[in-house]
Amino acid sequence: MWYRTIFGLLIASWLMATTADAQRETIVLSDGWRFALDSQSVGIVHHWPEQGLPAGLGRGVSVPHTWNVDPGSEDFSGAGWYEKLVSIPASWKGRSVRIQFDAVYHSAIVWVNGRKAGEHLGAGYTRFTFDVTDLLRPGETNRILVRADNSYSRQSIPFLRSFDWPKDGGIIRPVSLIATSRPGIEGVRVRPRIMSGSAENPGTGSVEIEVRFLPGEIADGEAAAIALILQEDTEPDSKIVLKREYSPTVEDGRARIECQLDSVRLWHPDSPFIYAAAVEVRKNGTPVDRMIAPFGFREIRVAGNRILLNGEPVRLMGVEWMPGSTVGRGMAESYEDLRGMLRKLRSMNAVFTRFHWQQDDALFDWCDRHGVLVQEEVPFWGPGTPLNDTLMAIGRMHLTEMIRDHYNHPSIVMWGVGNELASREKAVIDSVGVLYRFAKRLDDTRLVNYVSNQLAWAGGMDASGAGDVLMFNEYQDTWFLDDPARIGALVDSISRDYPEKPLVISEYGLCEPANQGGDERRARDLIYHTAVLESKPAVAGAIYFCLNDYRTHMGEEGSGALRQRVHGVFDISGNPKPSSEVLRQLSSPVELLNVGWNTGHKLEVVLIASQGLPSYSIRGYRLIWSDPAQGTITGGTSVAIPPLRPGEKIHIPCDSSFNGKIRATVIRPGGEIVLQRDFIAPY
């Protein structure tokens, strides 16, 4: 994984008597797959599941993989088959074994040694596992066969062609085999609660941990033996804050424990403090399985038309990124590809983003540790998507799998149930309400929202009103060809229709060449729209669309694997456009006003914490002044900026200028550059 693992320290601090055969073992199935397209749909008829791929058919690939970036199959919709031969250790005999797919787009059927292990249909971006204990032959070579299908379908989400990203088919995320002793852990859910404290001072908290066992491996009413370690996972010393054993009673295949902590540190974009819960299950005193779940103490809620983060009213600014656009890899992006784009997102001063479809755990691990607030969404997208009984059932499956697997991530503060549906229709409004309530039953600690592009239409009846936060895609003078001078009045009308709800502008931006003006217009529009939006108190956040020019099956630019929409402040290859610097400066939570003389005839830099978008208290920032001619801040003088609330101003003395010039740089607590300006000393 990208993040610093805590396994070493935790296991070293655990009972030294833990035996190697009691530990969870994982085989990652990345290399050595054979792949073949099935353009004639003959695989089932010709008994490939039982006999394997015919000799001489297909080619070698590594997983993750998508055929829609391969020459000749860029536009292929249909079935693709993957075959893997894997040797299973003889030591796995008698253990529970599961095969885990982090995502197969958009439907998958899996066979092991000619026998069907299971199917996962209509949900191409969520994780699924199958119990293959009775299908594998430990000590022998075993055959795994996967049929992936990316056909446009009425029984999948996204629906038919109603989505604006690539339809990349295949095993698009990692695959692994997991062996555990019994009773094995299926998952660990951590619910932290803040009892007292603030961003400035540690407080008290509690943690409720739910251990979900593999089906049938422990009886209801039986006492589970669980050892728990809670550990700091941000500080270099990784201090253990709790170590205890419990014997909770199992109910419905789950065991729950709760503990109190006298001192907890809160998770915040500027101080994303992470804890880890290490859970070990024991049987007759012997460890049989363990799992580690990172988490953070963070509270998100609404009060009137404000969003409160850890009790503080905030106005959030961010940018949306469309993954799946790495040239040559598409949706089968490596962690390095994803991490590179996440760094670009964070370099835009983004503390807020959303994803139209479910993402990999590793992406959210990065957001957890770098302070990015996220709305993750079910890909109900577009006005052509009907919320009929079939799709609503699939939507509930999407929500169940998404929330189950990503519940522990503190970066995820909102769940989304859809985007740009026919949200003025009563049937859609009712169905969005059903999805909202279903998501709330699964997770009552986060906000649940629906994203509308029709919220500004007169009447006050829109599906976005069912959510905790109003979310509006504002494209009034681009896709809707409206007068940009009316944007402020439209926002005011939304506020009148829904006076007690925060409003987030969930998208605004310029797509070319469908809209003319190029990047110069993109920068002008960005400045104008942001200025209008931040002048409206009801606007609690804004997400610019988009970070990148992105691959999509409906794009106006390019062709084949590089069909795309030119919507970003970075191009398809990740190169910045001039508008990226505009977005970075507008998204800064602090402004550098000027350099002048103070009353003591000393040079000083004047800073103010932003009151517009974004707006939140800053802590742990530093100012560095240096020589602009050096082209670096290394060797400059660093001064701590005291905590500032929105609108608070500070004058920071400087020792001297450098040949009449000075470079002022503001640094976040994590070391990232927030803002940088060069000044002429006022001699």
Image (cartoon, helix red, strand yellow):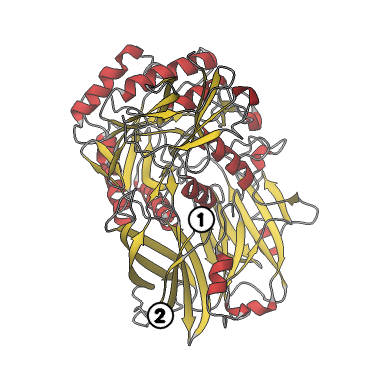
Report which residue position mark 1 lands on: 127
Q: Secondary structure at mark 1?
A: loop
- Please identify the quarter of the rendering in which residue 614 is found: top left
Pick out the residue farthest to the bottom: 284
Q: Residue at position x 43%, y 33% from top?
A: 318
User: Residue 258: x percent and y percent?
Assistant: 33, 69
Q: Sequence order check: which comes first, mark 1 or mark 2?
A: 1
User: Residue 493: x percent and y percent?
Assistant: 22, 23
Q: Is residue 231 above or below residue 1?
A: below
Q: Residue at position x 35%, y 61% from top?
A: 263
Left or right of 540 in this view: 269: right
Along the line of sight, which residue is nearer the eye, 680 or 88?
680
Along the line of sight, which residue is nearer the eye, 41 or 678?
678
Report which residue position mark 2 lands on: 224
Q: Amino acid at mark 2?
A: Ala
Q: Is residue 405 above or below residue 218?
A: above
Along the line of sight, which residue is nearer the eye, 600 or 572?
600
Q: Residue at position x 69%, y 78% from top?
A: 90
* Residue 402 visible to the viewer: yes
Alpha carbon distance from label 1 to label 2: 27 Å
User: Residue 546: x percent and y percent?
Assistant: 49, 29
Q: Are marks 1 and 2 in contact (CB under 8 Å)?
A: no
Q: Amino acid at mark 1?
A: Arg
Q: How many marks?
A: 2
Other-residue count near label 1 (Cα within 10 Å), few / some / many at <14 / 14–19 / ≥20: many
- Please identify the quarter of the rendering in which residue 116 is found: bottom right
